[in-house]
Amino acid sequence: MAYEKLILTKENGIATATFNRPEVLNALDQELHIELHEAIREIRDEREVRVMVITGAGRSFAADRDVNQQASFAWSESRPAPDTSRPSGTP
């Protein structure tokens, strides 16, 4: 699967998920959080993958939640509210 904000590699039994938003110190927005969940689902049943390493591109692993996105959710009526019954509104 192709991801926009996450780089997923698999080599020698190791899956590496790299947050790829270095311009905002890899702050977690909803899309990145969903992509991480999708990557976990992608590799969880692969027998050859024994471990997953989660890292960040650039100088930061993850700066926390993306406050810009949080603010836009609070002030935007055009965006649907996230589904809080599941992590990051994931299906």
Image: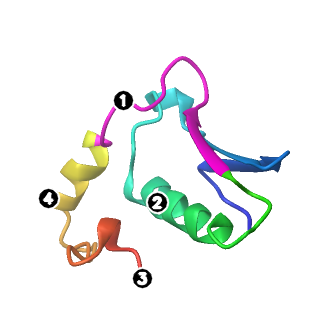
Where does the image place residue 55, in percent across and percent down from the top left?
A: 57, 34
Q: CA distance from mark 4 to mark 2?
A: 17 Å
- Which of discs 1 and 4 lies nearer the camera? The answer is 1
Q: Quadrant of the C terminus?
A: bottom left
In the picture, residue 27 is in which quadrant?
top left
Callout 4 amino acid = Ala
Callout 3 amino acid = Pro
Q: Report the magenta stretch's main SS.
A: loop
- Which of discs 4 and 2 lies nearer the camera? The answer is 2
Dot 4 or dot 3: first in sequence order is 4
Callout 2 amino acid = Glu
Q: Are marks 1 and 3 in contact (CB under 8 Å)?
A: no
Q: What span is colored magenta in the figure?
A: 51-66
Dot 2 or dot 3: first in sequence order is 2
Q: Give the crowd class for mark 4: few <14, some 14-19, many >=20 residues within 10 Å.
A: few
Dot 2 or dot 1: first in sequence order is 2
Numbered disc 3: secondary structure: loop
Q: Give the crowd class for mark 2: few <14, some 14-19, many >=20 residues within 10 Å.
A: some
Q: How is the image coloured?
A: rainbow
Q: Are marks 1 and 4 in contact (CB under 8 Å)?
A: no
Q: CA distance from mark 1 to mark 4?
A: 20 Å
Dot 1 or dot 3: first in sequence order is 1
Residue picked out by circle 1: 63
Q: Residue at x 45, y 30 (%)?
A: 24
Residue picked out by circle 3: 91
- Which of discs 2 and 3 lies nearer the camera? The answer is 3
- Which of discs 4 and 3 lies nearer the camera? The answer is 3
Where does the image place residue 65, in percent across and percent down from the top left?
A: 30, 42
Q: Are marks 2 and 3 in contact (CB under 8 Å)?
A: no
Q: Are marks 2 and 1 in contact (CB under 8 Å)?
A: no
